[in-house]
Amino acid sequence: MKKYKFPLLPGLLLSCLFIACSDDNKEDLPDLQPGEGMNYSPKTPDADQPLTITFKAPTSSALFGYKGEVYIHTGVVGEGDWQYVPAEWNQNIDKCKMTKLEENIWSITLEPDIRQWFQSGKTPIEKLGIVIRSSDGSKKGIDIDSFVKVTDHKYQGFSPAEIKHAALPGNVEEGINVINNTTVTLVLYDKDTEGNHKDFAHVLGDFNNWELTNKEDCQMCRDDAAGCWWITLNNLNPTKEYAFQYYVGTKGGEVIRLADAYCEKILDPGHDDDIPASTYPDNKRYPKGGKGIVSVFKIQRDNYAWSVPDFKMQHPKQPVIYEMHLRDFTADHSMLYSITNDTLKDARQEAELLALNQQQKLKEQQNQTLASRRQQTLSLQENVQRDLHTYETLMDNGQYEEAAHYLERLTFTFQKERFHPICGDNLINAILDSKRQTASQYNIRTSFQLLLPEKMKIETSDLSSIFFNLMDNGIESCQNSHSSDPFIQITASQNANFLTIHMINSKDPSYKFNHKTNKTDSWAHGFGLAIIEEIASKYDGSCQWIDGGDVFESVVMVEVG
């Protein structure tokens, strides 16, 4: 009879396995392992050297197990915008096609060097934005856009001069101020609740040929007492429309371009080409030097002949205000069509349909997460059984030292990969674990302390939707926070008949919460908070969003008793 040095360990390991895979936890899955996600070679990219980008799909990725072709969607990130993007989202070109190295691993090399691959000319390259996608664009390797810093030794970005301090001229206000027939003063407010402001502010426009310089017709002055940047532009043509943007930022930080918040007309590169001349004849063309939304001003206003020049409101202190984007709600994008049709009713129905579609997509994502978790649990069980067979073979052959090391590695791997439930609800466990895995790819710390009651009148799908959207918002906020140690912390507990969910996460102090997303495709992501608020209202609850500067708090209460 053979005597083993470790007679209890295999049984103990199998016991742990079957406990983890019991009926009560059959939807539990293991964590992601290190090395999955984005990989760069060299780790510190140089603009004038080739860069190899390798993506290994984690089990939570939409590309895990994907058999089709994979493409990279990438661009040079500057001034908050993606530039020199080789192809549109659904455009598949050989240049952006990735090579499949093995199952769930794809790679591409930007050669002969990054600059020539993007054909970016003399534009400084300091950061790349990257998305790994399926051929039809319906699947992303990682839900959140990835970014990698690049060193550029050849071309340097614009270097702003030191701040010019000067008192704000009299009789001006924030926005566009027409001083006389040839002079305009632009005023930009920039001061947070703690007195902080950007390090520089410039103006680019038709009046200086969109040239970014430190000259008087470009660099703005700073008045700390007023909390404003300002510049006076002279020798303007009173009958000409001028397009312009503010160029603001911090030294060593993000630089963005802004339209004037008080302008009466803008130019939009994403939509202006779709406006026919019959709707807006002689519309100003979008300037070559612009990026994003551009402001427009004109000193001499055009006269408008009102059909009812003496119109008076019956109750001026009790107005009913409707806000609508005419271009979105009319067939020919005209105001006349909007006024003569019942567009408000149609718009409301369309918005409700969009919200329902978004909720349906959310439920589909939750079902996919559960299916993935079941598959991972089965894979874990098969792997452990195979490893135990290898261990027993080593013991049977008398290779006791090798067996001891093998069992030590096996035990470590199992403890690391086995799923640790967060709460008693399998669906919420699956969602939070999936989101935690996504957060870990961006070095975001997560902690959960959920004390959910056993019986609740709230539907599981509604409660899981709250956690799903909260985690999405938290990951997005941490990704943009510039924090060296971003984190997400969620607690949930019942008090009387109400369940209170409290989330705290890192946040960019310079960003002021305005109930909107930071994502570039905001149309597709604008329903998150609305869905949470709708669910809270459905269960006689409430929502509170608290901007704490470098942290953000979300407090959601729903009746569960």
Image (cartoon, rainbow, N blue to C red):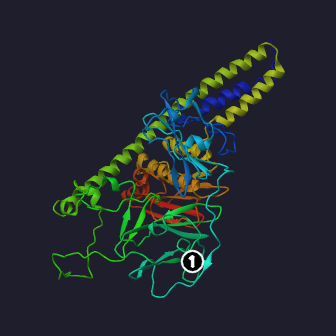
The percent coordinates of residue 120 (x first, y second) are 56, 47
Q: Residue at x 64, y 58 (%)?
A: 483
Q: What residue is rendered at 19% in x and 76% in y?
A: 306
The type of residue carrying mark 1 is Cys
Residue identified by numbered label 1 = 221
Examine the rendered structure and indicate whether residue 72 appears above or below residue 163: above
Provide residue 519's location: percent of width, then percent of height: 48, 53
The residue drawn where x is 28% and y is 71% is 321
- Foreground pick, 416 / 164: 164
Please tell me which residue lies in front, 215 or 538.
215
* Percent coordinates x, y for residue 357 in the rendering: 34, 46
Q: Residue furthest right?
A: 401
Mark yes or no: residue 422 visible: no
Q: Position of residue 71 (x, y in %)?
A: 51, 35
Quadrant placement of the N terminus: top right
Q: Is residue 13 visible?
A: yes
Identity of the residue drawn at 41% across and 40% down: 364
Relative to 268, is 64 on the left or the right? right
Tell me the SS state at disc 1: strand
Q: Residues within 10 Å of mark 1 (few under 14, many from 20)?
A: many
Q: Quadrant of the C terminus?
A: bottom left
